Image: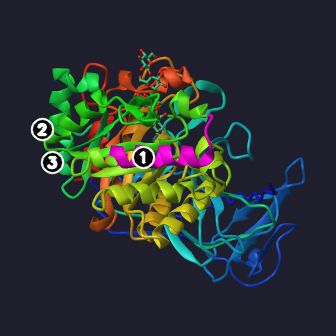
C-alpha cells in the first residue's frame, strides 16, 4: 500500500497564557493561511509562493525525504498539497506553556484531495529544538471520508498518550509538555493521494467543557439516571445475576442488559436427535430473559449468528447445504419466537466481515448458505418477530476502513430490503485509540442511514501492550477521558438514533480481556471491589 506522509509543524505565534480563572472569550491565533503560487521542493505544491508569506524550506533529513520549514507568520489566502511520501515541519518559535492545552484547539480546513478515506494523523511533538531526536509524539487520527473542504477543531488535550522514548515504562502526560510542535502525517490508499489543508489556527477558548478526572460523584447519581434518552447496558451472565453484589449494582446503574455468552448459539443449541429435531437448552438464556423481565430492563439479544459460536455438530454437519440452511432457519425462528416480546433487539449476525477487507469472513454460514446468508438470517428473524429491532454488530468499524466499507455495503443491502433497524459498534478500544473524531465520523455513518446506534460492547484497555503491572494514575486518567469521549460522541447523536450504550461487563476482574490477551488490565467502570473508577465519572461527566 502506498503511503503519503507529511508532517507540518508550525509556529505557535504570539500565544496568550490562559491561567486558571482567567476569563476570555474565544480567541484565534491564526498560524498559517497559505496563498500565492509556487511549488515547494519535491513534494508540496502550494497555491501561493510560501517563501514571501513566511514559510521557508529547511534542510532535508538523511533520506532526503525530510524538510524543515520555518513559519514566520503570514495571514494570506491559499493552501498546500502533499503529493508523495515526504515530511515537512513548521517549527514553533515559542513554547506552549504547560497546563494550558485543555482550552487550546487546533483548527484547520482539510480536504482529502482525490482520495476519500484518507487517514490524517495530526502529531503533537515535544522535544528539543533541533529536529526529531528524542521527540515524543502524540497522535490524533481521523479519516477524511469525503472530498470537500471541512473545518475541524481538535482539542489538544484529546491527543492520545505517548511513550517517553527514553523510558518505555513511563507514559507521558500530555499536559506536562513544555514545547509543542504540531504536524500532520497523512497515510494514503493504494495510489498516490493528496491531502490539502489551509487556514491552520490555534484557538483558545474560555469556559470549555472538559473532562475532569477527579470530580466528586454525588451518592444518588447513577448512569441510567444521567442518561435520560438512551439505555445504559451491561453484559451479564446467569451466575452473576444471582449474586447480590452484582445484581444490586446492575439494577441500580443500568436499564438494559446483554447476555455476555448465554444467548449465543453454542449455549442454546445442543445438537440434533435421531429424528432430526434440534435439541435446545434454554436454562441459561431463560434466566437472563427472566432477570430483564422481573427488573423491567431492556434486553438486547446477543447473538443469533456468530462464526465463533457454532456447536460442534453444525461445524461438522454432514448433510446437504439445504439441510444446513433449514437448521439455521429453524434455529433463528425458534429462538426469536420463544423470546418474542421479551427480547427488545437482536444482534442477528455478529462480525460477518473479515478484518482488513471488505469481504465476508470465511465461515460455515458463508460456505453452506452462500453470500446472501446475512440477508437470509435477517429475514428469518424478521419473519419470526416483526417488532423486534434487528442489528448488525461488529468490531473495528471505526478504524478499519475496508472493513467499514464492507460492513456498510452489507448494511445498505439490508436497508434496501427493510430488514435492519440498527448497527452495533462493539468498541473494544484502547485508552489512547481510536480518536474521538474518528469515533464520531464512523458513528455518523450509522446516523446518515437513519439507523439506531448501539455502542454494544464498550471496554477500554489500559494495558494493550502489556507495559504496566499495576493500574497507574496516568492510565486511569486516560481511560476516564476515553470513556468521556465515547459517551460524549454517543450523547451528541440525534435523540431518535440513540439506542443503547452497553458496557462489556461490570468490574475489571470479570473482563474477557485479561484471559484473552494475557496482560493484566482494568478495562471497565468498576474495580474488583465494586468501587467506581475514574472511567465511571468520565461516563457521568459526558452526560452533564
Ligand atoms: O463455560 C466455560 C466454563 O465452564 C469454564 O469454567 C471456563 C474456563 O475458562 O470456560 C468457560 O467458557 C468460556 C466462556 O467465555 C465463559 O466464561 C469460554 O472458554 C470463553 O471462550 C468465553 O469467552 C467469551 C467469548 O466472547 C467467546 O464466546 C467471552 O466471555 C465474551 O466476553 C466474548 O464476547 C465477545 C462477544 O460475544 C462478541 N464480540 C467480541 C467479544 C469479546 O471476544
Camera-near label (1 vs 2) is 1
Query: Where's ligand 1: which quadrant?
Result: top left
Q: Does the magenta stretch include residue 326?
A: yes
Residue 417: image location, x then y, percent: 47, 70
Which one is earlier in the sequence, the residue at label 3 or at label 2? 3
Which one is earlier in the sequence, the residue at label 1 or at label 3? 3
Disc 3: which residue: 225
Disc 2: which residue: 294
Q: Is residue 110 magenta?
A: no
Q: Element under label 1? A: helix
Q: Nearer the viewer, residue 382 or 479?
A: 382
Residue 372: image location, x then y, percent: 58, 59
Mark 3 closeness class: few <14, some 14–19, many ≥20 residues within 10 Å: some
Q: Element under label 2? A: helix
Looking at the rendered image, the quarter that the N terminus falls into is: bottom right
Report whether 441 appears left or right of 45: left
Q: Would you say the beta carbon of the disc 2 residue lies within 8 angstroms of ligand 1?
A: no
Amino acid at each position: 500500500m502506498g503511503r503519503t506522509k507529511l508532517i507540518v509543524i508550525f509556529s505557535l505565534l504570539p500565544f496568550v497564557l490562559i491561567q486558571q480563572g482567567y476569563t476570555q472569550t474565544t480567541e484565534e491565533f491564526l498560524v498559517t493561511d497559505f496563498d500565492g503560487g509556487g511549488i515547494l521542493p519535491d513534494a508540496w505544491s502550494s497555491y501561493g509562493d510560501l517563501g514571501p508569506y513566511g514559510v521557508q524550506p529547511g534542510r532535508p533529513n538523511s533520506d532526503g525525504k525530510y524538510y524543515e520549514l520555518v513559519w514566520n507568520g503570514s495571514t494570506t489566502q491559499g493552501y498546500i498539497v502533499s503529493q508523495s511520501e515526504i515530511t515537512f515541519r513548521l517549527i514553533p518559535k515559542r513554547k506552549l506553556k504547560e497546563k494550558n492545552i485543555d482550552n487550546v484547539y487546533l483548527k484547520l480546513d482539510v480536504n482529502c484531495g482525490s482520495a476519500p478515506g484518507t487517514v490524517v494523523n495530526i502529531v503533537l511533538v515535544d522535544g528539543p529544538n533541533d529536529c526529531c531526536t528524542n521527540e515524543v509524539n502524540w497522535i490524533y487520527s481521523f479519516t477524511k471520508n469525503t472530498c470537500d473542504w471541512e473545518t475541524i477543531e481538535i482539542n489538544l488535550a484529546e491527543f492520545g498518550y505517548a511513550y517517553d522514548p527514553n523510558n518505555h515504562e513511563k507514559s507521558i502526560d500530555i499536559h506536562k509538555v513544555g514545547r509543542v510542535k504540531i504536524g500532520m502525517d497523512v497515510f494514503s490508499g493504494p495510489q498516490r493521494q493528496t491531502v490539502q489543508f489551509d487556514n491552520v489556527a490555534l484557538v483558545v477558548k474560555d469556559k470549555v467543557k472538559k473532562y475532569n478526572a477527579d470530580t466528586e460523584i454525588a451518592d444518588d447519581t447513577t448512569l441510567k439516571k444521567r442518561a435520560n434518552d438512551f439505555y445504559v447496558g451491561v453484559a451479564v451472565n446467569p451466575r452473576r445475576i444471582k449474586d447480590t453484589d452484582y445484581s444490586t449494582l446492575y439494577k441500580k446503574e443500568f436499564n438494559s442488559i446483554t447476555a455476555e455468552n448465554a444467548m449465543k448459539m453454542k449455549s442454546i443449541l445442543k445438537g440434533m436427535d435421531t429424528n432430526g429435531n434440534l435439541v435446545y437448552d434454554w436454562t441459561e438464556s431463560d434466566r437472563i430473559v427472566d432477570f430483564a423481565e422481573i427488573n423491567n430492563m431492556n434486553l438486547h439479544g446477543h447473538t443469533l449468528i456468530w462464526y465463533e459460536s457454532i456447536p460442534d455438530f453444525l461445524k461438522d454437519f454432514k448433510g446437504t447445504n439445504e439441510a444446513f440452511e433449514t437448521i439455521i432457519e429453524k434455529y433463528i425462528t425458534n429462538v426469536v419466537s420463544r423470546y418474542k416480546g421479551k427480547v427488545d433487539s437482536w444482534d442477528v449476525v455478529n462480525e460477518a466481515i473479515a478484518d482488513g477487507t471488505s469481504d465476508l469472513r470465511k465461515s460455515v454460514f458463508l460456505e453452506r448458505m452462500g453470500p446472501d446468508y446475512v440477508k437470509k438470517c435477517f429475514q428469518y428473524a424478521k419473519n419470526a418477530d416483526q417488532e423486534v429491532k434487528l442489528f448488525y454488530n461488529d468490531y473495528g468499524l471505526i478504524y478499519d476502513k475496508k472493513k467499514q466499507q464492507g460492513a456498510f455495503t452489507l448494511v445498505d443491502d439490508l436497508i434496501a430490503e427493510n430488514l435492519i433497524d440498527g448497527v452495533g459498534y462493539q468498541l473494544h478500544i484502547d485508552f489512547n485509540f481510536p480518536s474521538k473524531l474518528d469515533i464520531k465520523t464512523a458513528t455518523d455513518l450509522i446516523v446518515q442511514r437513519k439507523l439506531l446506534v448501539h455502542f454494544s460492547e464498550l471496554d477500554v484497555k489500559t494495558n494493550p501492550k502489556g507495559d504496566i503491572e499495576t493500574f497507574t494514575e496516568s492510565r486511569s486518567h486516560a481511560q476516564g477521558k476515553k470513556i468521556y469521549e465515547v459517551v460524549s460522541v454517543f450523547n451528541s447523536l440525534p435523540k431518535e438514533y440513540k439506542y443503547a450504550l452497553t458496557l462489556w461487563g461490570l468490574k475489571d476482574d470479570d473482563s474477557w480481556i485479561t484471559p484473552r490477551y494475557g496482560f493484566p488490565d482494568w478495562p471497565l467502570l468498576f474495580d474488583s471491589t465494586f468501587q467506581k473508577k475514574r472511567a465511571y465519572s468520565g461516563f457521568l461527566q459526558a452526560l452533564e
